[in-house]
Image (cartoon, rainbow, N blue to C red):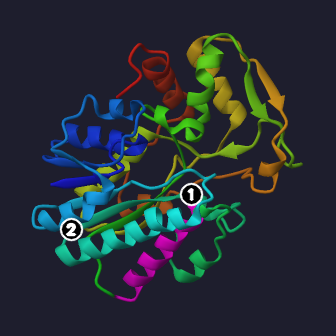
């Protein structure tokens, strides 16, 4: 049995699809659905069970001998969330509790960290799990801080030789995009936000730069297709001897201008971009450059290529965002 927390969410529902295609057997989804269309992320899937997060502890206790792997992707992922007590409960405490359960019952744990742990990037983007390296990172928001707290605690436990799950991996996801992110509102990728407007003939609207080294729209991010994230998780699942903290990005920084041009190309439109002022509240916390160092994952044995931004956006736009059925 495999448990996927956040299994109805963006990355989680894509992972459930990948696990089904891989013949993984019984897959249990842990999530909340609310009143919107989030359920549609799982409409094509056949989970063995769906469990509310509040009931997860009892479920784990009742099925401890049957659970092989827990993929923990459930979290408050909004970088704008300011209820820190809620973030502590949902992001920190829940992950530490899962670690304890997996350690005590011999289940593997693969959990979502985030590139938000790198803060403004001034300390680099190396997924070095040494305590001294992690201590230099300064996240810019409570969400990033919560992921960093977990990373530091779990890597320290492992480094000190204390008991761990038989396999554990924390994955620092960079700017992920792809199908099934529609329920995320303002936390959707820019691709999902602007493609409907661009398809109607509107220009792309990108932030002006307030950094001398970057032109307007020239701010850079490591954009990674959700299929690549799923491929990494499935590889780890198939390689139970690999543990540690790993970046999950494309390994190549690209500009917002590149992203907009790729969307226009997928739509068959001539690019038209308007540059707008960045809100002042964002200017002191804005990342102008992110790029995942992927050497650690490569050295662990992962050799699959990552999609180019152009190929990933072409697939996403044509096969999902402007298709009659945008869901995987």
The magenta-colored residue range is 143-161
As displayed, is residue 80 above or below residue 41?
A: below
Kindly identify the residue that appears in the image at 37 percent across and 63 percent down.
300
Between 146 and 248, the one nearer to me in the picture: 146
Residue 45, located in which quarter of the rendered image?
top left
Pinpoint residue 32: horizontal percent, then vertical percent.
36, 46
Q: Residue 245: image x %, image y %?
A: 44, 67
Residue marked by disc 1: 115
In the picture, which quadrant includes the N terminus? bottom left
What label does residue 107 carry, if any?
Answer: 2
Within the magenta stretch, is there residue 186?
no
Question: Is label 2 in a helix, a strand or a loop?
Answer: loop
Mark 2, Cα crowd under 10 Å, few <14 / some 14-19 / many 20+, is: many
Nearer to us in this view, 101 or 171: 101
Q: In the image, is residue 152 part of the stretch drawn in magenta?
A: yes
Using residue 5 as the reference point, say whether residue 93 is left or right of it: right
Q: Could you tell me how far apart the alpha carbons at marks 2 and 1 are, in whole angstroms?
A: 26 Å
Q: Hey, which quadrant is residue 133 in on the image?
A: bottom right
């Amino acid at each position: 049995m495999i448990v996927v927390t956040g299994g109805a969410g963006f990355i989680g529902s894509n992972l459930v699809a990948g696990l089904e295609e891989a013949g993984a057997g019984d897959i249990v989804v842990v999530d909340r659905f609310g009143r919107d269309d989030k359920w549609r992320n799982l409409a094509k899937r056949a989970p063995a069970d769906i469990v509310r997060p509040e009931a997860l502890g009892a479920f784990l206790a009742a099925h401890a001998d049957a659970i092989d792997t827990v993929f923990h992707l459930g979290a408050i992922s909004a970088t704008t969330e300011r209820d820190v007590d809620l973030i502590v409960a949902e992001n920190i405490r829940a992950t530490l509790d899962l670690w304890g359960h997996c350690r005590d019952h011999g289940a593997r744990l693969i959990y979502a960290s985030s590139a938000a742990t790198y803060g403004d990037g001034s300390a680099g983007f190396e997924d070095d799990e040494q305590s001294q390296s992690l201590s230099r990172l300064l996240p810019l928001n409570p969400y990033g801080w919560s992921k960093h707290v977990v990373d530091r605690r779990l890597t320290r436990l492992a480094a000190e030789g204390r008991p761990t799950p038989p396999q554990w991996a924390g994955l620092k996801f960079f700017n992920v995009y792809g199908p099934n992110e529609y329920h995320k509102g303002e936390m959707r990728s820019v691709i999902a936000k602007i493609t409907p407007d661009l398809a109607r003939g509107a220009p792309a609207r990108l932030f002006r730069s307030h950094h001398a080294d970057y032109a307007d729209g020239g701010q850079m991010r490591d954009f990674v297709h959700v299929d690549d994230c799923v491929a990494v998780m499935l590889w780890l699942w198939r390689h139970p001897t690999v543990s540690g903290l790993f970046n999950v990005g494309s390994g190549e920084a690209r500009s917002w201008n590149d992203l907009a041009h790729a969307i226009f190309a997928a739509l068959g439109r001539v690019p038209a971009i308007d540059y707008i002022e960045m809100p002042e509240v964002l200017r002191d916390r804005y990342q102008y450059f992110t790029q995942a160092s992927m050497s650690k994952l490569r050295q662990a044995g992962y050799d699959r290529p990552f999609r180019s931004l152009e190929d990933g956006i072409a697939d996403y736009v044509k096969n999902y965002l402007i298709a009659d059925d945008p869901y995987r």
